[in-house]
Amino acid sequence: MSESDVASEYRGWWRITETSQWVNKGIDILGPAVLSITGLGDRLRMHCLLAYVSCKATKTGVSFTWEGAWEFDPMSGSGSARLGKDGRLRGKIRIKNGADSTFIAERCAQPAEAIQHPPSYRDKWRRW
């Protein structure tokens, strides 16, 4: 297995159910909070964050980088995850030059509605 090949037990869609540092009450404000690890246009959506994700295999699980927007502000970061004995994904999401949080996710089906693309900073001013 090459470094970029993610193990099959990690592939698929994961529903983020809780975070340690960010309020869980608003986690689904843009729709169900999800992380995809499919190898085909992977995405991250939670709170007001929409991002594109790039994953790779590690010795203990999977690591990823992400780039997108929190509301209309450009953001990027990284993360890592591994499977717990209970089959849930446990990981950490980091915001570049910002906060980080652990998360727990459960396997789920692909959302029925496509995850929207992260908005550009220019779109912020087009709203008015």
Image (cartoon, helix red, strand yellow):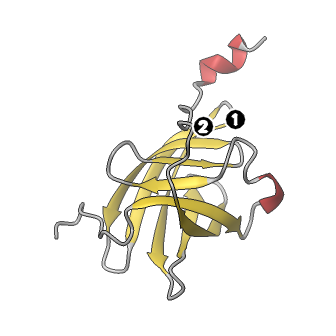
> In terms of image quadrants, where is residue 95?
bottom right
- Asked whether, in this view, residue 2 is left or right of residue 106, the answer is left
Q: Secondary structure at mark 1?
A: loop
Q: Residue 39, how many percent across, how many down? A: 32, 51
Can residue 23 be spotted in the picture? no
> In terms of image quadrants, where is residue 99?
bottom right
Name the one closer to the observer, 55 or 37: 37
Q: CA distance from mark 1 to mark 2?
A: 6 Å
Q: Residue 119, how many percent across, how many down? A: 59, 27
The 10 Å Cα crowd at callout 2, few under 14, some 14 to 19, many 20 or more, is many
Locate the C terminus and report the quarter of the image it occupies: top right
Q: Residue furthest left?
A: 1
Q: Secondary structure at mark 2?
A: strand
Judging by the rendered image, the residue that carries numbered circle 1 is 71
Judging by the rendered image, the residue that carries numbered circle 2 is 69
Can residue 53 be spotted in the picture? yes
The residue positioned 57% from the left and 25% from the top of the image is: 120
For badge 1, the amino acid type reads Glu
Say if 58 sits above or below 51 in the image.
Answer: below
The residue positioned 55% from the left and 38% from the top of the image is: 115
- Asked whether, in this view, residue 72 is left or right of residue 1, the answer is right
- Circle count: 2
Mark 1–mark 2 CB contact (< 8 Å): yes
Q: Residue 77, how many percent across, how many down? A: 52, 52
- Asked whether, in this view, residue 44 is left or right of residue 19, the answer is left
